[in-house]
Image (cartoon, rainbow, N blue to C red):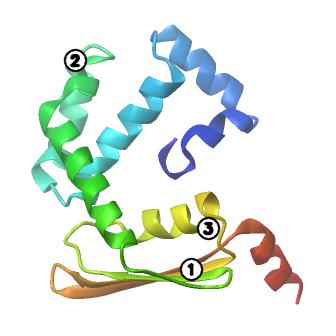
Amino acid sequence: MGDIGSSIFDWSIGKKAEELLNKEELSKEDAIRLVSLLDSNYIAMDRQSVENAVSVILNSNTKDPLENRKWNNNAERIVKEIEKAFSGLNVNGKFAEIEFESDFNIVSYIARKAVWKMDFDAVLVVNRNFNGLSQCIYALNQEQSMIFQRS
């Protein structure tokens, strides 16, 4: 599910995904949350949790990882960082610029949220201090991207 999130259920693979979830007695919401919790380890740059994730998943029942305290803590911290990053939002029509500083790897998430959920045509996201480095990413919504490809 990764970056695709819940829209996976709209794709042709969605039916197979639902079958697998039903087999494991997981709801779509639980699966989306589990993916988010797993991703939170990498996004928070928590190397130990990333390395231990496979073991946690393999050595627990299907729903136990949903209650993993450290993963949930990472996810909560990420939500706060994203909210803080959006406080640096500058809008110029259907174009957005978002500039912030964070040790979390959230630039691509912020860019996708701006074009997919906030409906900007394009966004430039800059993290001025990602562990001492700068990150920059731009994103276009699908309709706009198709227009630029045709030009």
Q: Residues within 10 Å of mark 2 (few under 14, many from 20)?
A: few
Q: Could you tell me if residue 67 is visible in this image?
A: yes
Q: Could you tell me if residue 13 is visible in this image?
A: no
Of label 3 and label 2, which has the lower sequence position? 2
Q: Position of residue 39 (x, y in %)?
A: 33, 48
Q: Position of residue 18 (x, y in %)?
A: 61, 21
Q: Position of residue 117 (x, y in %)?
A: 60, 57
Q: Position of residue 56 (x, y in %)?
A: 19, 29
**Amino acid type, callout 3:** Val
- Quick one: SS at disc 3? helix
Which of 71/86 is in front?
Answer: 86
* Horizontal relation, residue 115 to residue 113: left or right: right
Which of 137/110 is in front?
Answer: 110
What is the C-alpha distance between the residues marked 3 and 2?
A: 37 Å
Q: Could you tell me which residue is drawn at 60 percent across and 26 percent down?
A: 17
Q: Quadrant of the C terminus?
A: bottom right
Instruction: Give the number of the disc on residue 115.
Output: 3
**Amino acid type, callout 2:** Ser
* Horizontal relation, residue 28 to residue 58: left or right: right
Which residue is identified by label 1?
Answer: 123
